[in-house]
Amino acid sequence: MNYLRHERNYSERTVQSYGEDLRAFESYFKNQDDHLSWEAVDADVIRDWMESMMDKGNNATSIKRRLSALRSFYRFALSRQLLTRDPAHNIAGPKAAKPLPQFLRESEMDELLDGVEWGDTFKDVRARTILLVFYETGLRLAELVGLDDEAVDMNSRQLKVTGKRNKQRIVPFGEEMAETLKGYMQLRDEKVGRLSKALFVTEKGLRMNADQVRYEVKKNLSRVSSLKKRTPHVLRHTFATTMLNHEAGLESVKKLLGHESLNTTEIYTHTTFEHLKKVYEEAHPRNGR
């Protein structure tokens, strides 16, 4: 855990998840045989563990995540010469279906930001600003929560964002977002003040936490969308899909989103194809023949 935390710079949440996964595996093999140890575990024990999770109704994604934690642990143990073999090395996780990411249509976002009635209270101005920042930049929830005022460069119109594993990237934004941020920050400083250097704060001046932002997003997306998922990540999907629909290059979108691999970004090309297919089916006069 210390290795993940201090040498790999994993987030505290990820470190905790890895610890829970490893303890779950240890509990499993101890229940199977009191004499089993981490050194004595073989590939069959790991496969039986995966099968037991499937029998309990765990989905493929959660099983693969736990297997990933186990692989990482055994690689670490080998590198420190704590073990002489890696029983997880050649074990493949269950194949998971990849659902297309959900996103809002541009018309829905236009309706939300421009069509619905917004008040001039601090909470209303803050909520609309948060939605616009998500939509214009594609930030992750943790990245938005972690923004400080000093991360906002109004002159260059760009954000300095700290992403996964403390990797930083620069994300540009437009004139509308600049004006919206200025209005929000001015109102915040006049009406609330700050007990934190955070950009987005509560009515008490403290940094907003992830649950508070999630609540604001879900409440306001409900005004224009009937999607089951109404989360900040849906707005991230919406940003990526909108960019690709307007002919942004895949590599550029990858950098803006802070993805390490182009494969992660490519899922949005399938989304845009589905969108184009739907447009074709609805619009082409001979499609129904």
Image (cartoon, helix red, strand yellow):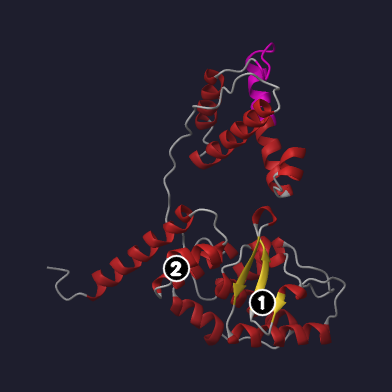
Q: Foreground residue, 79 or 69?
A: 79
Image quadrant holding the C terminus, namely bottom left
Up-down relation of residue 30 to residue 271 (above or below): above
Q: Residues within 10 Å of mark 1 (few under 14, many from 20)?
A: many
Q: Is residue 30 above or below residue 150?
A: above
- Give the mark, 2 or 1, whose residue is nearer the N terminus: 1
| Residue numbers of the magenta segment | 23-39
Identify the residue under disc 2: 241
Seen as rendered, the residue at the extreme right is 195
Residue 199 in view in this figure = no
User: Residue 40: which quarter of the image?
Assistant: top right
Secondary structure state at the residue bearing disc 1: helix
Locate residue 168, reporting x and y percent.
66, 62
Q: Residue at x 46, y 62 (%)?
A: 102
> Please, what is the three-letter code of the amino acid marked with disc 1?
Ala
Looking at the rendered structure, the kind of residue marked 2 is: Thr
Label 2, label 1: how many angstroms apart (C-alpha)? 22 Å
The answer to whether residue 268 is left or right of residue 5 is: left
Regarding mark 2 in the picture, which secondary structure is present there?
helix
Corner quadrant of residue 176: bottom right
Residue 199, percent from left and from top: 75, 74
